[in-house]
Image (cartoon, rainbow, N blue to C red):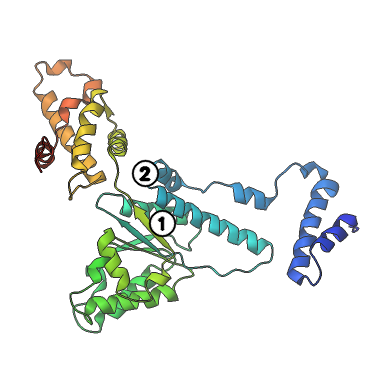
Amino acid sequence: MKTDRALYKSVADAGKGCLAADLNRVFDEWFDKKLRTQVYSQYAELETVNKQLAGKKPRGSAFTELETMVGLAEAKSVINQALDFYKAQKLFRDKGVATGRPAMHMVFTGNPGTAKTTAARLFARIMKENGLLSKGNLYEVGRADLVGKYVGWTAQIVKNKFQAAKGSVLFIDEAYSLVDDRDGLYGDEAINTIVQEMENNREDMVVIFAGYPDKMEGFLRKNPGLRSRIAFHVPFADYDAAELYEITELLAKGKELTLDPGVREKLVPIYEAALTRDDFGNGRFARNLVEKAQLKQASRLVHADDLDAVTRDDISTLVAGDFDAPAETAEAKKRRIGFGA
């Protein structure tokens, strides 16, 4: 194939003193365009493989499941960043540019029931379904899985967990429980070993720490090198009343149930009252309401005057009367009425 002015112009545009990699890139781009527009003109309108890769949506059901979950804006954004990063690495390699992979370790902080564990499980599946980790499994551990009974045992236990999770996601739930009351105990040994193993396995593993926001700050301060090895700090916000009702609809749908139109009017005030409680369970609170509503629905239908008149729609529908506010929520709402505390 003969060279032409377009190639000479591209080389001139690259500037003086360009590296061999730059020249190779310029030539590859010119050669690719030449093939598609002149030699094999029938492919002129097709996208290049790289453009197809850049615009390709992530594969697998896990990504779809994450996208359909209520809220989780920060978690969704981080996972999309991770997927974009891996796409970019392939594009860079195709251009002859070698780049090191930065650590992808994360901290998930949020109150109970904000879907931290669910997001971690989906993240591992997404990485696996898109071939972004060599294995892509999820290993869930807590303090009991990492701390040994005797001095010297803990470090080896932690190393074994990292070895088992190589190529996958290691999810350390309630990570703040590793912080002991006094320095120099087994928890410190676990944390120090975790920091060392995070660095040793940064190329083919993601470690996710999870816990409550205030307690996780104390955990991150425990070891000076811990915070610097974490790439993403992902906050999981509390759900508002509208989001909790959306979660209720999804939970019902998963059980092949529908909600009567009057349920929303009944539940939103219950959720608004529950949001003021310190021990509010977010998504768990919604799940408990649905499960209790199923029990009440069963009792209602069993004691119907005419059991033969109960239809399939009756069985698959939850009505407003099936939902009751927990006693502590109703009491909290009652105390807020008037000018008293």
Would residue 219 appear left or right of 62 to someone viewing this image?
A: left
Q: Can residue 196 be seen in this view?
A: yes
Report the number of numbered marks: 2
- Asked if marks 1 and 2 touch (Cβ < 8 Å), the reply is no
State the image coordinates of residue 227 (x, y, percent, origin top left): 38, 70
Q: Nearer the viewer, residue 21 or 265?
A: 265
The relative height of residue 60 versus residue 251 in the rendered view (above or below) is below
The relative height of residue 313 versus residue 211 in the rendered view (above or below) is above
- Which amino acid, by three-letter code, is at mark 1? Ala
The relative height of residue 9 versus residue 292 in the rendered view (above or below) is below
Q: Is residue 142 visible?
A: no
Q: Which residue is drawn at 13% across and 19% down?
A: 307
Judging from the image, what secondary structure is the residue with disc 2 in?
A: loop
Per the rendering, the mark at residue 71 is 2
- Which amino acid, by three-letter code, is at mark 2? Gly
Which residue is labeled 1 in the image? 124
Judging from the image, what secondary structure is the residue with disc 1 in?
A: helix
Would residue 25 appear left or right of 324 to someone viewing this image?
A: right
The single residue placed furthest to the front in the displayed view is 339
Q: Which residue is drawn at 44% across and 76% down?
A: 200
Q: Which residue is drawn at 43% across and 49% down?
A: 76
State the image coordinates of residue 226 (x, y, percent, origin top left): 37, 72
- First along the sequence among labels 1 and 2: 2
Q: Which quarter of the figure has residue 208?
A: bottom left
Density class for disc 2 (Cα within 10 Å; few <14, some 14-19, many ≥20) is many
